[in-house]
Amino acid sequence: MSLAKRDLISINDLSDGEIEAIFDVADSLEEPLRRRQARDICPDRIMATLFFEPSTRTRLSFESAMHRLGGSVISMADANSSSVAKGETIADTVRVVQHYADIIVIRNPLDGSARLAGAFAEVPVINAGDGAHEHPTQTLCDLYTIRKELGSIAGKSVALCGDLRYGRTVHSLAFALARFGARITCVAPPGLEMPDHVRHRLIRHYDCRPAEFTSLDQVVTDREVIYHLQVPNHQAAEMLTGDELVPVWDLMSLFDVIYLTRVQKERFRSHAEYEAAAGSYQIKRAMLDKAKKDALIMHPLPRVDELDYRIDRDRRAAYFRQAGNGVPIRMALTALLTGAVRTPAGVAPPPPRPAPERLPPDLVCVNERCVTRNQPYVAPRFLSVGGEATRVQCAYCDAELPRPEGALHPLEAELTEKG
């Protein structure tokens, strides 16, 4: 099945083969990109960028990608100067804009808003960040950077540090890293740990149980954590004892990738809550003395004070190269989704999303940031959670909640109807 005319809302909308195909196209575009020779790929295509939130790297790299492919861009970079300020809904906005463009790139602060946009638009929709939910094109850039600089993703030890609760980049990235066989460690200040629905999916779908720390100064005493980090190949386990102490600075030497995210002030309900979390983790120059010589320090940017500026000149500081990789990746993705470049034959798509369940009409999503809680015309929809009979998840933002009392799992309902 071709990628042409498809939406990209979640990293799970792509199969592993499709991700590799995007990387291969990005590789093929790098030389023409340097020579300014890629302009004949999308000469008659128009991209619309709809950004309801501020953005620098994502919006400009998408627009740069389309211009370098020879296409054109129309942009809504400020929602306050658009019809949105008059009360226009997301659904109406994309239904209008689809007549002006061949592909829509949308960023919106509501979780699940990109999925909603895709449901109403007849042209491909790319999620450029929907609230604290996902940011799949950033994940493609991140994976591409790791593969390009370290040769592969499988078997690499990756530390995800910082705001893992609201940092949508790490949600998409965690799923993709698990799929490609990386080992994940989470370092997050209290209250900013990885959301339960992300953690549950990592365990349920990929049998991935990340080691978790609460700060970069923590001393690890948990035998399972040490085993996870130091004996990934399950060798010499008898050499470890339960009372070993391993400072995180020494653990730095075990990571191939240290991925930081900033504490995002705009995601907090109060300034006091933000202040309590900000500054609780930093990567300083001295820490790199303990890191691997070929490790990567990555960050989706912008940074605040979590990265020492003295790190910038270190070869291991990959964040500006990581940002630069956004152009060939978004060129490849745009060319494939608009059909300007064919998807290689034999590349299988991911499994289809399950159909929504029939549940009580008054059931609402538990996530206050969900698009269904903030756009009244959107009816809540819920999907089964893997093989679990006791939980369902929002079809838009993926938040999980208990199955309503008396509501049958689809399989149970089918058996009941037959019986």
Image: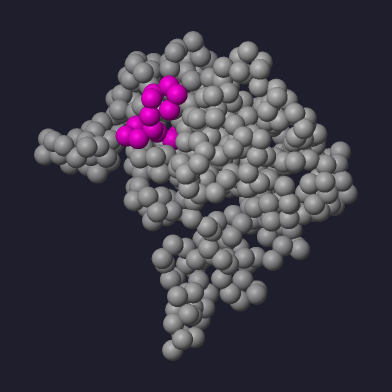
Left or right: where 78 falls relative to 66: right
Q: Looking at the image, which residue is at 56% across and 39% down? A: 343
Q: Report the number of numbered marks.
A: 0
Q: Specify start and end residues of the magenta stretch as a single range.
A: 147-161
Instruction: Look at 55% across and 27% down and name the residue there.
Output: 26
For the C terminus, give its image quadrant: bottom left
Regarding residue 28, the answer to whether it shows in the image is yes
* Residue 277 pos. (x, y %): 52, 37
The location of residue 292, given as percent across then percent down, is 33, 20
Q: Is 152 covered by the magenta stretch?
A: yes
Residue 61 located left or right of residue 224: right
| Residue 386: in magenta span | no
Up the image or down, 295 lies above or below 343; here it is: above
**Residue at the farthest front position:** 345
Quadrant housing residue 186? top left
In the image: residue 281, left or right of residue 86: left
Q: Position of residue 337 (x, y in %)?
A: 63, 40
Residue at horizontal 34 percent and vertical 20 percent from the top = 291
> Observer-nearest residue: 233 or 32?
32
Relative to 261, is 373 above or below?
A: below
Q: How far across and down, in percent of the image, does residue 84 sit?
A: 83, 47
Q: Which residue extends farthest left?
A: 238
Tell which residue pokes out farthest to the top in this image: 313
Asked if one can make out residue 191 in the rendered structure from this viewpoint, the answer is: no
> Residue at point 68% right, 60% down?
372
Quarter of the image holding residue 161? top left
